[in-house]
Amino acid sequence: MIKDALPNHVVIKTHMMRESFSNNVKIMISRDIRNSLVSMMRTMVYDTDINSTLIKLVDFKKIQFKFDVQIEHLIKILMMKNNLHVIKYEEFINNHDLLYNKLEDIFDIKIDKEERNEISLKYSQTNVKKILSNLKGDNFKIYDETTHLHNNHISNSDDNSNDELYKTYLSEELIEYINLKYGAILVKLGYSI
């Protein structure tokens, strides 16, 4: 959505922001790390039948080192205060105007109503499902080259604006562990534990 809303700007979409971006305007779309963990587990450990079993602490321990690397990277990004703008995914996914308004403020631009409607339609849940249905296979690495949408992501859920969607996929024991171990970063990003 951001690339479409900023056609006159260079937009680099990445999961791992580089320090070389330090002087550039940075927009970080934050997501509850527990929801991010579900997506990570879907891509690394489970097949597409993840909905049938809760992810347990023992499962998480198998990939915790990779999750910790991402958390460390997230902390570094949050320390790059220069030109960093954090937008919570759950706040704009069902109200795209919040995102457009934020982009207008950051870049001192105007995104007209027609353009907003066109972009929002392109990224509506219905169209996202159509795009994903055209992707062959369930592999996370298979993605749409135009939108960068990919299979097996928690965002593909019907209730993807739910702050607590992770509760559908993670065991209570794992949620308690995550809240204890990563509680400070959750609070810093504005999520409750």
Image: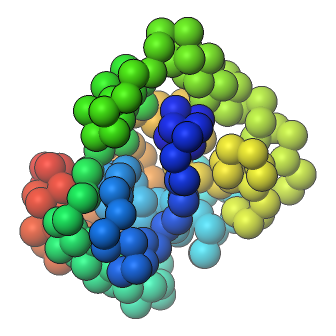
Which x, y percent locates residue 190?
14, 49
Residue at left 73%, top 66%? 141
Task: Give x and y (percent) for residue 175.
Answer: 27, 62
Give the side of residue 59 with respect to residue 3, left or right: left
Point 54% across, 60% down: residue: 12
Quarter of the figure with the C terminus: bottom left
Tell me if 111 is positioned left or right of 118 in this view.
left
Residue 57 is drawn in which quadrant? bottom left
Q: Does residue 88 appear anywhere in the picture?
A: no
In this view, 31 is above or below 101:
below
Name the residue rendered at 31%, 73% in the picture.
Answer: 22
Residue 38 rendering spot, x and y as whole percentages: 46, 60
The image's colouring method is rainbow
Q: Give residue 122's quadrant in the image.
A: top right
Residue 116, placed above or below residue 175:
above
Q: Nearer the viewer, residue 3 or 43?
A: 3
Instruction: Tell me residue 161's x, y (percent).
Output: 39, 33
Q: Residue at x 26, y 51 (%)?
A: 86
| Number of residue marks | 0
Q: Is residue 81 visible?
A: yes
Q: Is residue 39 left or right of residue 60?
A: right
Q: Is residue 137 above or below residue 120?
A: below
For the residue pair 136 and 10, the one nearer the viewer reads as 10
- Quarter occupied by residue 68: bottom left
**Quarter placement of the N terminus:** top right
